[in-house]
Image: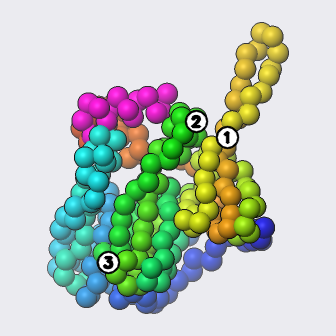
Amino acid sequence: MRIPDAPIKVEVTDETFAGVTYHLRGSLVPELQIEVSGQAVMFEHHTLLWKEHQVGIELRKLPGGIKRKIAGLDFFITKTAGSGRIAFSRDWPGQCIPLHLAHGQEINLREHHFLAATDNIGYSFERVQGVRNMLLGGSGIFIDKFHASEGDAVVWVSGQGNVFEVELDSGEELDVEAGGWLYKDPSVTLSSHSLGLKAGMFAGDHKLTWNRFTGPGKVAIQTMYIEPLESEAGGSVGAAATGGVAGAVISGLLRG
């Protein structure tokens, strides 16, 4: 197991990959600035910080629409149209990590940590199986999956706090606090585990729950976790607005 001594380096100036040039500015709450030309960029609308006037905004429909809607997830995503500069940020301190994917590569991302991506990438989701992941894992029941199916692509992700990338050999296991992981290779499997802690006859039982990652491949660890506002969706009212009554019920059950 290879554990780095320092967080991922994110100081980037004039980096060009997959048809776009981008810049990362700031250290506390980083700004991702992208120069859009021939290659469009997709993003969640609430991550938009500013744009040049001539950059247009369009909708892109996502696959698995009815399943996403029932779960309270976005049915559409926004993307750029035209050329110019556009910038994004998240509402928490941390690091913006650019993930360069060669044609055919895939990355699995914790939901609600996607910042932006080149529009030539496949974007789907995976349901995390198992009752313990649903009710105790603390990581939600969906993982965002990005697949570079149409050439090289970039996914920009937003980690909370500092981000460390751990490389696991085949069969190696790493237990991570349920809010502590950011992304992983698809070759790394994820499962949820709980340990019962006895506190005495009158103190009741307690459970410690974590996500177990099994290699081979890399997994990124974030050093803090703030529940994203969009995952709360303003409580059951917000969930009902985005995913219908079923979405609100499911959302409420999964959050206890």
Q: In the rendering, at what x and y percent does residue 11 appear?
A: 57, 80
Which of pointers 2 and 1 lies earlier in the amino acid sequence? 2
* Residue 220 in sight here: no
Instruction: Return the residue at label 2.
Output: 132
Distance in Å between CA atoms under marks 2 and 1: 7 Å
- The amino acid sitting under disc 2 is Arg
Secondary structure under tag 2 reads: helix
Magenta span includes 133: no
Work out whether 244 lies above or below 198: below
Q: Is the magenta stretch mostly helix, strand or loop?
A: helix
* Quarter of the rendering occupied by the N terminus: bottom right
Q: In the rendering, at what x and y percent does residue 102 appear?
A: 47, 83
Which residues lie in the magenta part?
243-256
- The amino acid sitting under disc 1 is His
Instruction: Return the residue at label 3.
Output: 120
Q: In the rendering, at what x and y percent does residue 50 appear?
A: 30, 69
Is mark 2 in CB contact (under 8 Å) with mark 1? yes
Which of pointers 1 and 3 lies earlier in the amino acid sequence? 3
Front one among 53 and 227: 227
Residue 163 is left or right of residue 19, and the answer is right
Instruction: Return the residue at label 1.
Output: 193
Circle 1 residues within 10 Å: few <14, some 14–19, many ≥20:
some
Q: Which residue is drawn at 51% across and 37% down?
A: 134
Residue 152 is left or right of residue 192, and the answer is left
Work out whether 50 lies above or below 16: above
Front one among 124 and 243: 124
